[in-house]
Amino acid sequence: MMQQIDVGLTDCLKELHLPTVRECYNEQADLARRESLSYEQYLLELVEREREVRKQNRINRLLRESKLPVEKTLATFDRKRLPRKIDVQINVLLNGSFLDRTENILAFGNPGSGKTHLLCAIGYELVQQGRRILFKSCGLLVQEMLIAKRDLKLQHFLKQLAKYNALIIDDIGYVQQSSAEMEVLFTLLSYRYERGSVMLTSNLPFSQWEKIFKDPMTTAAAIDRLVHHCIILELNLPSYRLEESKKQKRKINIMQT
Ligand code: ADP
Ligand code: MG
């Protein structure tokens, strides 16, 4: 009898795609009998577990898909280094509502100030909330777009990106770009405008963006699209790496004296 029920249940739960219920129902039934749980409590326990595992699987899938560097999270980010105003801004960004308003986040600052780490950490938290994020270095993104364009698939490529709530473009303007490169970048920013958020980092302030987009008209148009709805984070901080290595040296000096 019991065996028949087991076979029947396993069969049904397989077909209904409820793997966690299938794994847990036996053990939970023992527990329910021991603790005299009601039928409803038992059922609730099982479906809650199924939901929890599904949610976690989905987040893991989104995290893999995001290509976010795994170690750059808020847990490893020292927020005390940030000016108070930016720290407060971050709390607001973490609720993710900027994505619903397709606002952009632009992080400026000297190399090593933590721009990439900070935007990745925000991205990571948003993935935990079920948002779809994609991280790409600007250089790689541009190369992929050039290939797509060559294969007459640029529109398709841009549409693929549209499924992400936010596209993190890391280090825009870091390398000098050819006109073909800046053209696809401009196409992307235009396409993305009011369709989805862009989160970007740059060592170059807007005043130097002509180096990226070459002519003043395109530069102004690109900046215009980005800043229409945006939050700017100015991270003019000393380089984290430099400070850490100084601290390290100081430690060594102390040890030697
Ligand atoms: P940027 O993108 O501004 O050049 P990064 O985000 O790459 O700077 O930071 C440089 C290095 O310093 C990285 O290894 C990063 O993890 C680390 N770092 C920067 N700021 C912080 C911080 N506030 N807390 C912890 N690590 C940081
Ligand atoms: Mg960076």
Image (cartoon, rainbow, N blue to C red):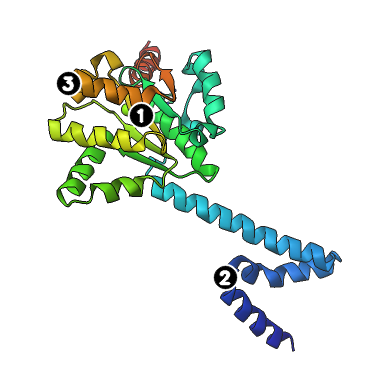
Is disc 2 surrounded by few (<14), some (14 to 19) or many (20+) residues within 10 Å? few
Query: Within the displayed image, which quadrant is ligand 1 positioned in?
Result: top left
| Quarter of the rendering containing residue 33 | bottom right
Which type of secondary structure does the marked residue at label 3 adopt?
A: loop
Name the residue rendered at 60%, 81% in the picture: 11
| Amino acid type indicated by mark 3 | Asp
Residue placed at 42% from the left, 30% from the top? 119
Q: Position of residue 123 (x, y in %)?
A: 45, 36
Q: Tell which of 195 and 24 is nearer to you.
A: 195
Badge 3 vs badge 2, beta-carbon distance below 8 Å: no
Secondary element under disc 2, as helix, strand or loop, is loop
Which badge, 3 or 2, comes first in the chain's sequence? 2
| Upstream in sequence: badge 1 or badge 3 | 1
Numbered disc in front, either 1 or 3: 3
- Tell whether 127 sits left or right of 228: right
Spatial separation of the CA atoms under disc 2 and disc 1: 40 Å
> Helix or strand or loop: what does disc 1 sit on?
strand
Which residue is the extreme one toward the top?
Answer: 257
Relative to 232, say whether 67 is above or below.
below
- The amino acid beneath tag 2 is His
According to the picture, the residue beneath numbered tag 2 turns out to be: 17
Q: Nearer the viewer, residue 62 or 23?
A: 62
| Figure label count | 3
Q: Nearer the viewer, mark 3 or mark 2?
A: 3
Question: Looking at the image, can residue 56 be seen?
Answer: yes
Residue that mark 3 sits on: 215
Question: In the figure, residue 180 lies in which quadrant?
Answer: top left
Disc on res. 200 = 1
Decide which of tag 2 and tag 1 comes sooner along the chain. Answer: 2
Q: 126 or 253, which is in the foreground? A: 126
